[in-house]
Amino acid sequence: TVDQGQIIGVTNFFRGLSTAAARGYGIFPAAFRDYVTVSSGSNADFTVAGYTPLADVSDRPADTLPGLNSSGVTLELGALWDPAVTAAVPDAAGTLCALQLSQAAHVTVTTNAARGGLVSALTGVTLTPVFTGAYVDPNYPYVIAITAESGVVTVTFRGGELLTAPAVTGPWSGSGNTNGLYTNLLSGAASAFYRVRRAAVITPAPGITGITLSGGVLAVSFQGGELMTAPAVTGPWTGTGNTSGSYSNAVSAGPALFYRVRQ
């Protein structure tokens, strides 16, 4: 789940059986059922569109997060391999997948107990997973897509300035374009390569920028992170989940409140 914005994509996941040549967790139960056809024996096309780790909400509506273009997704990942081939056993560490976010957000990961949680392939082994959330900024520089149509090449990108080169080894030249869209006429047989260089970004230091009291409402403006509150300057400090830069609350005759910002 994310605390703001939406999860708009799931990428970088392994597909299919785990083998000595290519290991990973590429079996997605719902998607396998709905999209993959086993032609003969163990032959199956795992590249078919729609085969992703996203769980089908209709299977268990009460225990499944809404999916793409929402604040939460439920993922199903498993593995199948030949037990006689030791080298086919999936790695114990690595990247299962990547989430594409609509904006910077705190990402929280946990097991889904109703769907079985995390299950070991070894009989009698109980796994106790430990998940660590993180603050993620999706605005890293990369090329999103390159298309060629009617003699025009179109490059969409994000996170910086588009660079071009006649070869993958360079020399790379800045295009001066940072707006995310680049077009150019195709010319003969000449090759062109593209990458993105991060633009200089000034990140504000976390802090309170103003506190006002008007009409019985306390308004706190801040920058650079999540606003925290405490009943005393020594704590304990509690996160509000608010990273928007603006917070307001009706003032009561109760105890004092203190504010600070964590990145």
Image: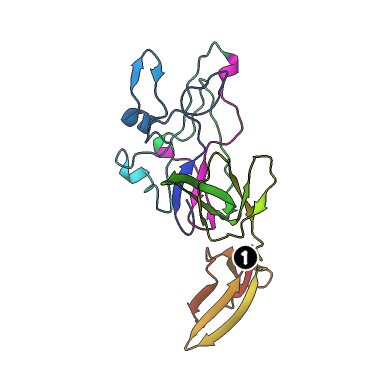
Q: Residue at (55%, 38%) from the top-left corner?
A: 189
**Furthest-left residue in this view:** 58
* Frontmost residue, 29 versus 171: 171
Question: Between residues 101 and 256, which one lies in front from this camera angle?
Answer: 101
Would residue 254 be seen by someone viewing this image from the given angle?
A: no
- Label 1: which secondary element: loop
What residue occupies the far front of the structure in this picture?
188
Q: Above or below — where is 120 with respect to 144? A: above
The residue tagged 1 is 237
Tell me, what colour scheme is on the image?
Answer: rainbow
Rendered position, 226 above or below 20: below
* Residue sitting at x 60%, y 71%: 223
* Quarter residue 166 falls in: top right
Name of the residue lying farthest toward the bottom:
215
Magenta residue check for 175: no
Residue range corresponding to the magenta coloring: 86-114
Q: Which quarter of the figure has residue 38?
A: top left
Residue 104 drawn at (x, y percent): 54, 58
Residue 53's spot in the image, x, y percent?
43, 36
**Residue 208 rendering spot, x and y as whole percentages:** 63, 75
Residue 104 lies in the magenta stretch? yes
136 or 65, nearer to the observer: 136
Q: Can residue 25 be seen in this view?
A: yes
Residue type marked 1: Trp
Relative depth, front residue between 213 and 82: 82
x and y percent of residue 17 in the render? 47, 22
Relative horizontal placement of residue 123, taking residue 211 as reference (left or right)? left
Tell me what residue is drawn at x 59 percent, y 81 percent: 211
Mark 1 Cα-neighbour bin, 10 Å: few <14, some 14–19, many ≥20: some
For the C terminus, which image quadrant? Answer: bottom right
